[in-house]
Amino acid sequence: MATVDHRPDERRYVLLDGETEIGEEKYVDTGDERVLFHTLVSKDYSGQGLASVLVRGVIDDLIASGQKVVPVCPYVKAWLPKHPEYADHVVEPTRAHLRAIAQQGA
């Protein structure tokens, strides 16, 4: 069973199969908002719904910590409308959010 591990020093969450890293979600923080800009699952694990497991784990962690999600990554942007239970925790991306990604060198 895949698990999600937050690695704040690396500004990312990782999806693990045991101890093997099989995916990641990169982010940038802007105050109490977390900008999700890159979702990736290894091709060896594609087609198993693991990107959804990763994104759900990330967003559940954000909600638990009182943060809002800013979906910039195309996968996250497509995933959120399918999960309306998270709508109250979503902030639409602005130019400031995009600049924050660029300033972080992401």
Image (cartoon, rainbow, N blue to C red):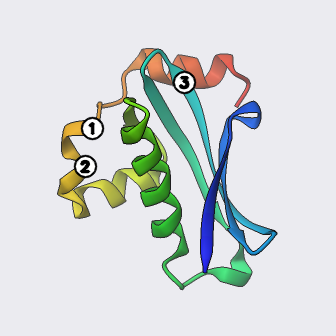
Residue 41 placement (x, y as % from top left): 65, 68
Report the residue marked by disc 3: 29
Residue 67 placement (x, y as % from top left): 39, 29
Residue 88 placement (x, y as % from top left): 19, 39
C-alpha gap between disc 1 and disc 3:
15 Å
C-alpha gap between disc 2 and disc 3:
19 Å
Report the residue marked by disc 2: 86
Say left or right for 28 vs 59.
Answer: right
Q: Amino acid at mark 2?
A: Tyr
Q: Name the image quarter holding residue 82.
A: bottom left
Q: Are marks 2 and 3 in contact (CB under 8 Å)?
A: no
Say left or right for 78 vs 72.
Answer: left
Tell me the SS state at disc 3: strand
Tell me the SS state at disc 2: helix
Q: Quadrant of the N terminus?
A: bottom right
Q: Amino acid at mark 3?
A: Asp
Report the residue marked by disc 1: 89
Front-most of 89 and 38?
89
Front-most of 48 and 66?
66
Say left or right for 42 vs 34.
Answer: right
Residue displayed at 24% across by 60% down: 83
Tell me the SS state at disc 1: helix
Q: Quadrant of the C terminus?
A: top right
Q: Are marks 1 and 3 in contact (CB under 8 Å)?
A: no
Residue displayed at 34% across by 58% down: 78
Front-most of 46 and 17?
17
Residue 64 placement (x, y as % from top left): 39, 40
Q: Is residue 7 placed above or below 48 in the rendered structure?
A: above
The numbered mark, 2 or 3, whose residue comes first in the sequence reads 3
Q: Are marks 1 and 2 in contact (CB under 8 Å)?
A: yes
